[in-house]
Amino acid sequence: MDTYSTLKNEILNINRDVSFLFATAKSIPGMADYSFGEWEKTCKHLPRQLAEDTVRVAIVGPIKSGKSTFLNSVFKDEYVKRGAGVITSIVTRVRKGEQLRAKLFFKSWSEVNAEVERALVLFPSLNWRSENAAIDIRQENDRNELKRALSELSADQLITQSSRNINSVILSSYLKGYDTVNSLLTTENAVRLYEGDRFAEHRDFVGNETLAVYLKDVLLEISSGSMESNIEIADCQGSDSSNPLHLALIQDYLLLTHQIIYVVSSRTGLREADIRFLSMIKNMGILENIVFVVNFDFSEHESIDDLKSLVNRVREELSMIKPDPDVYAFSALYNLFSAHPKSLSAKDRPRFEQWNTDSKFVELSNRETTLFESFFYDRLARKRYTLLLKNHIERLGVILSGLADWIGLNRDVLTRDADSMTDALGKIKSHQQRIDKIRSAIKKTLNGAISDIKKELQRDTHRFFDGHSGNAVGNLENFIHTYTFSPEKYQESLKNADFSQTLYLVFQEFKQSIDTYITESINPEVIRFLQAREKRIQEYFAALIVPFDTMIEDAYEEFNGMLGRSELCADGINPSSKKPPNMDAVISSGSVSPPPLVATMHYSTKIKTEAIMRLGLYRVMRNVAKLFRKSANREGAESLRALKDATRRMKRETGKSVAFHLKDYRENLKFTYLFKLVEASSDGFSQTVLDRFQAYFSDLSASMERIGTSQKDKSRAVKVLSEMDQISRQLNMKLDLIREEIAEVS
C-alpha cells in the first residue's frame, strides 16, 4: 500500500474513533438525545469526501504527438487506443481501480439532435424542411433527407480552410453510427460498462469517429501500473483540432486539473499550433502547473546529437512562454514496449529489438524517464497530501480540540460539590446569554456579508460582460463588427454552384473565425476573471474572521474564569487562530463548478431566407432593366450583391446572438457558480469559527440536569468522561504524527 493510502486509512480510523467518542458520550445517563451538531455531520461525510477527492492530471498536445502512448506507458499496457486521431470531443479519463473497467457516457437524444440542428444552420439543400421544423435523427425520413442533403454537397463545401468541413463530418458521423448506437441511447445520459474480458470492446466506440461522436465522456479504471489512488490522468483532444469547440472542452477540463503534461513530438518539434495553445494556457493563469515531454522515436533521428539539438531548441522556444520550463525527453513507445517485451506483436518485436541495439538512445530515454517519474510522482504526492488530506486533518483537529473542552467542562462541573455545582450551573445559564449574543452577531454578520459580497460580485460580473466597458466582451463585439469578408473570392462558386451553397461556405468561414476567437481569446479572459473573483471571496471571508477573534477569545476566557478554570484550552492551542478553508477545499467539498466554457452560438437561419429573397429582388430588377433597354448588371452581379447583403446581415444577427449568449452565460455563471461559492465559503467560515467553540455554545446546564443528582450517576459520568479524555489525547497525538509525515513530503 502506498504512503498516501496508508495516511488516508489512518485518518479514516481517527474519524471512526471520534465518531465512537460521540456514541460514548451519549451512553452517559440522560445524554442519549444529545447532539454534537456539525461535528457529527463532518465525521459522517468525511469518508465519502476522501473517496471522491481527486488530483487531476491532463495530458495535452497536438494530434499524433504520442499522448495516448504516453498514457499507456504510465499504466504499462495498451489500454487507450493509440493513433486513433479521430475528430471527436472526448476526454478519456483514467483512474486506478480494483479491476479493468471502461465506462462510456453517452449523449442524450436531445443533445444529439441539438448538435445536428447547430450543424444544419444555413446548410444548403434543405428544401425538404420548413424553417422552424425540428429535426429528430431517430426519424427514418429525417435521416434519409440528411443523407440526400450531404450527397449534394460539392467538394468546396466538404473542405473548409484546407480541412474537412466540421459540420459535414458531424452529420455524416451521426448518420453512419446511428444503427449501432440506436439501442444504447436514451432520453437521459446513458452509461455503458465494459468490464474484465470485455474491456477492449470500448475501443470500438472510442476509436471509431462514427460512434465516438455519440459519446460525452470516457472513464477507464485500470488495476495495474504505477499510478496511485485518487489520481485521475486524462488524454485530451489534440490541441490543434480543427474544431474550436473541442478546444473549449479541453479548457473545461484544464480548469479542474492540478498538473498538465504537454507532449511534443520530436518529429515536428514545437509548431505554431503549440505556441498558440501554450499562450492560451498562459492567459488562463495555469502555466505554472505544466511540465513538458519531448516524445521521441528512435527511428526518427540520425544520431543522439541530432536529438539533443532538437530538445535544446524546443527548450529555448518554450522559455519564451515559460521561463525555465521543466522539459524531459524520452520515448513513451519504448517504455510501453519495455513493460511487456515478451508479448509484443510480430510487427512491434523487431522494432523493439532494433532499438535495443542503440545503447545511447536507450540510456538517454531510460535516464530521462527516471528523472521525469521522480519529478512527476513527487509533485503529485505533494499535491495529494496538500489538497486531499490537510483540510480533513485540520477539521478533525478542530473537532478533537473542541471535544477535549467539552469533556473537561463537563467533568469540571460534575466533580464539584452540590453547592458549587449549583453555583456553576447558574453561571452557565447566565453566560448563555453572552454566548447567544455572539452567535447572533456571527449570524447577522454572515447574512450581511453574504449579501454584500454577492452585490459586489454581481457588479463585477455585469461590468465584465458589458460590451461597452472595453474588456474582452467588448473586444468580441468589435471583432464581429470589424470582421472583413471577401465575397469576391466566392465568385467562382457563385457561377458553378447554387447560391445557398455559396452562402453556406461564407457562413462556415465566419462561424469558424468567431468560435476560434471566443475559444482562444475570450475563454481565457473569463477564466482569469473567475480566478480573481475566487481570490476575492477567499480574502473577504478571511478578513471577516478578524473582528471575531477578540470577541470569541474574551468570551472563552470569561467562561473559564467564571468556573475557576485557568487553562486557555485543553490542548494549548489558541482557539481563535483558525483560518477559513482554502478555495480549492471549498470548491471540491461543495460540488461547485463553473458552467462549461463551450460556447455554442445560436446563429439565425433567417439570414438564408432573407438573402434568397434579396437575390430574387435583384434578379427582378435586372430583368426590368433589360425590359426598358437600360444598362443591366453583368451576369452574376446580382448574386454577388445578394451575398454582400447576406454577410452584413450575418454580422448583425451574430452580434445579437453573441449578446444573448453572453447574457445567458453571465446569469448562469453568477447564480450557479459565484453565488454558490459564496454560500459554500460562508458555511466554511461558520464552521471554522464555531466548531472549536461548540462546547461553549451548547446549553450545558440542560445536559448537567439530565445526568441527575445521584452520586452513582455522577461517578459513572466522570469515569466515562475520563476514558474519553484519554482516547481524545491519543487521537490528537496520532494526528500530530500524520501532520509531521505530510510536512516531510510536502
Image (cartoon, helix red, strand yellow):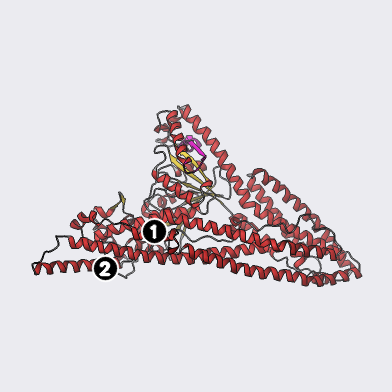
Is the C-beta separation of discs 2 and 1 under 8 Å? no
Q: Position of residue 149 (x, y in %)?
A: 26, 61
Task: Determine whether the residue tagged by mark 1 lies in a helix, strand or loop.
Answer: helix
Along the viewing direction, whichever of 712 and 532 lies nearer the viewer: 532
Mark 2 / mark 1, whichever is N-terminal = 1
Is residue 340 highlighted in magenta? yes
Along the viewing direction, whichever of 152 and 505 lies nearer the viewer: 505
Residue type of the residue flagged with mark 1 = Val
Bounds of the magenta segment = 320-342
Image quarter (top left, top right, bottom left or bottom right) of the C terminus: top right
Residue 416 can be seen, yes or no: yes
The reply, left or right, for residue 81 in relation to residue 384 is left
The reply, left or right, for residue 155 in relation to residue 284 is left
- For the point 48% across and 27% down, the residue is 359
Q: Nearer the viewer, mark 2 or mark 1?
A: 2
Q: Quadrant of residue 348?
A: top left
Q: Residues within 10 Å of mark 1 (few under 14, many from 20)?
A: some
Q: Which residue is mark 1?
A: 181
Task: Determine whether the residue tagged by mark 2 lies in a helix, strand or loop.
Answer: helix
Q: Position of residue 289 (x, y in %)?
A: 53, 47
Is residue 234 highlighted in magenta? no
Q: Quadrant of residue 400?
A: bottom right
What's the CA distance linking mark 2 and mark 1? 35 Å
Image quarter (top left, top right, bottom left or bottom right) of the N terminus: top right
- For the point 46% across and 41% down, the residue is 318
Residue type of the residue flagged with mark 2 = Thr
Q: Which residue is mark 2?
A: 609
The reply, left or right, for residue 213 in relation to residue 587 is left
- For the point 75% across and 53% down, the residue is 732
Residue 179 can be seen, yes or no: no
Q: Position of residue 268 (x, y in %)?
A: 39, 39
The reply, left or right, for residue 76 in relation to residue 452 is left
